[in-house]
Structure formats: structure tokens, C-alpha cells
Amino acid sequence: MRSSHRWLILRLEAPMLAFGGIAIDHIGITRDFPAASMLTGLIANALGWHRADWRRHQALQDRLVFASRLDRLSVTGTLTDMQNAQLYQNKVGWWTTGECPERRGGGKNTYLSPHQRFRDYHADASVTLALRLVPANLDPDLDSVTRALTRPARPIFLGRKPCLPTTQVLHGEQSAATAYDALMGVPVSEGADSTMRCCWPVSEGPETGSSVHRIVDLADLRNWKSGLHGGSRRVVEGTIVCAGVSS
């Protein structure tokens, strides 16, 4: 019998949220399940880390073990935002610290014509995660993450800066042998279907049977030194049946 582990339960819920996938040219898609790199950035932001602290980000990403459950996705599909911008050399902005203006370099016009891109979002979505860190005794530990998510050092956003959560991200704790089992113990909302789509790492839930749809290599890891995405995880996509209804 496998030993039981402590899992933090996170609820990612917002009017708009984005789980960025592989971008092609100017089109930024969103996956249905959150990426390991996104979750790393969310926790690091709550802890107050600077994005240049790539060693800490890399170590945190390497320790993440999590499964995600789609409690609710929009029945109308994804929302696509068309963005247009034309920036000039003399445009000035402010750093998030508010300490000094940020100026752009380059020629007279950053773009000779307006720059257009498309970004996909999930509208009115709700995703539940079960998360732990391996090894558990390094810094940050789950207690540090709990404090950071309860009182974050900076505002939390879910994938992109416009995606502000509508509820407390930290939703509670579970004790279970696997990430899949931890999610099974989280009650569903009243009126929700008890059978939901789910994604979990190989060895953290069933790998055969009716609940398994496919096993894939998910490219959601980031090289935090270079700032580029590269590498993949072996994950299972399928369904999960959750008993009980939350109050």
C-alpha cells in the first residue's frame, strides 16, 4: 500500500483564464489544463520572487507534482482577444516596482505598422488542482506556499495579467496516496456533474481502464535560465468521479 501524502488544493476560477500552450506565430492558444510552468510562476509570484531568480524557479518547477480537474469550462468554447499595438521609441512605462520609468530602444517606430496578435482565454472557468512538492522538506515547503497563497506578496493572476481570480486560490488540503485520489476527495459544486475531465502525472493515478483516455508527453516545462519552453512530462488524460457536493 502506498503511503499517504499531504496535498494542497487550489481553485483556479476567473471570468477569464488562460493556460498557454504552444504559440504559433502571433496566435496564443490556451490549453484546458494548467501548465507546470504557469503553476511555477503563480507560486513564485505569490512568494515575491523576481523573475530573474531562475535557479529558484527551476528548482520549484522540478519539484511540482500536481493533477488538475476541469470543474467548469464555457459551453461556448474559448474567447479570442484580438490585440493591436503600435509603439514608438519615446513611449515610457513604469516597472511594477514603480521606482523608475521603462524606456524602449530601437528605431523611431518599434513596428512599421500596427502589430496584431490573438490570445485565447477560457471564459467563466473553474479548475481544481491537487499539488505537493517532492522532496517535501526543501525551501519552499508546503507551509511556505500556503502562507504565500493566503497573503501573496503580489497580485495573483491565472495565466495572463488580465486574469484575476474571483475566489481564494488556496482551497484547502487533502491527505491521499496519489494526486488523482486527492482530487477525488474534493467535493464538487452543487449542480455540477460528478464525472469530470482530469489530467494527472503517470504514477499518480490509474494508467489503464475506462477512466483513462490517453497517455501523452505534455510540453509544458520551461527552461527558466533561457526563458524558453522546452521539455515535457508524461501525463494521463481521462476522467474522474468525485463523490459529495460542496456546501
Image (cartoon, grey):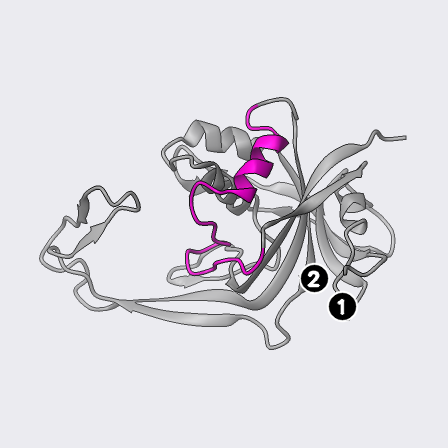
x, y percentage for residue 201?
A: 70, 42
Q: Earlier in the sequence, mark 2 or mark 1?
A: 2
How many badges with numbers are in the image? 2
Label pair 2/1, CB-CB below 8 angstroms:
yes
Q: In the displayed structure, does residue 63 sit left or right of residue 18? A: right
Residue 224 quadrant: top left
Residue 76: numbered disc: none
Mark 1 Cα within 10 Å, few/some/many (few <14, many 20+)?
few
The residue drawn where x is 36% and y is 34% is: 52
Q: Is residue 161 above or below residue 223?
A: below
Q: Can residue 234 be seen in this view?
A: yes
Q: In the displayed structure, does residue 228 sit left or right of residue 7? A: left
Report the front residue among 168 and 199.
Answer: 168
x, y percentage for residue 242?
A: 82, 56
The chief SS type of the magenta part is loop
Query: Which residues lie in the magenta part?
Result: 139-167
Q: In the displayed structure, does residue 186 sit left or right of residue 72? A: right
The residue drawn where x is 85% and y is 31% is: 2
Secondary structure, mark 2, is strand
Q: Can residue 221 be seen in this view?
A: no
x, y percentage for residue 193?
A: 79, 67
Residue 192: numbered disc: 1
Q: Label 2 is placed on what type of residue?
A: Asp
Residue on which disc 2 sits: 71
Mark 2 Cα within 10 Å, few/some/many (few <14, many 20+)?
many
Q: In this view, does 225 lie above or below 122?
A: above
Q: Is residue 23 on the magenta stretch?
A: no
Q: In the displayed structure, does residue 116 sit left or right of residue 41? A: left
Residue 141 quadrant: top right
Q: Label 1 is placed on what type of residue?
A: Ala
Check the image and name the residue furthest to the top.
Answer: 137
